Image (cartoon, helix red, strand yellow):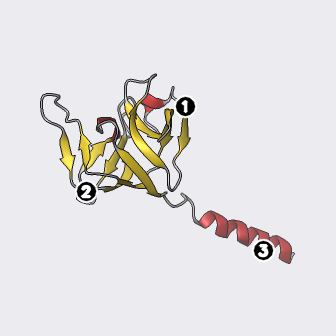
Amino acid sequence: MCDYSLHLTSSRPAKVGDKLITTAFANSMTRGLSAVGEPNVAVCCGPGTEVVFDKEVTYKRAFGLMPNGRINERVARFRQIDKEQPDTHHDAFEFPSGHIVMVHRLCLGQRVTVLQLPAPAHPQENEVRQDVISGLTAI
């Protein structure tokens, strides 16, 4: 849910309506998201979490000599990429145009609001439990 580089940072899962900000954490060499007013707690998004940025998105390019990149879209979906590579960054935002920006490349201070969390991983689980409960009460 949060990049390997944030495992030594206090964290919590994202909630609908969270107001987040791109942050550099004191005990990490990377960037992530924290709640506004809670700069030492990483807020972790699950794959599929939808967010909206307050303004156009800016990010650091791979080569520091180039100017910051800009995306004129504001809505994005959180996802993880290259999960088969254990010691690399995985957290990213994908925009409707297909553009993907790694979370650790986002410029600091950008504000984000969580719009929607992903659906539960096993939606049939409740149906199965209800069938079991129904079966038990019928016996």
Residue type at tag 3? Ser
Which mark is drawn over residue 134?
Answer: 3
Q: Position of residue 10 (x, y in %)?
A: 55, 31
All told, the count of numbered labels is: 3
Q: Position of residue 120 (x, y in %)?
A: 55, 59
Q: CA distance from mark 2 to mark 3?
A: 48 Å
Q: Position of residue 49 (x, y in %)?
A: 44, 54
Q: Which residue corresponds to mark 1? A: 10
Q: CA distance from mark 2 to mark 1?
A: 30 Å
Extreme right residue here?
Answer: 139
User: Which corner quadrant of the image does residue 109 belong to?
Assistant: top left
Q: CA distance from mark 3 to mark 1?
A: 42 Å
* Mark found first going from the N terminus, 3 or 1: 1
Dot 3: element = helix
Extreme left residue here?
Answer: 66
Residue type at tag 1? Ser
Which mark is drawn over residue 99?
Answer: none
Question: Does residue 106 appear to the left or right of 122 in the view shown?
Answer: left
| Residue 42 visible, this orientation | yes
Residue 56 position (above or below residue 131): above
CB within 8 Å, label 3 to label 1 = no
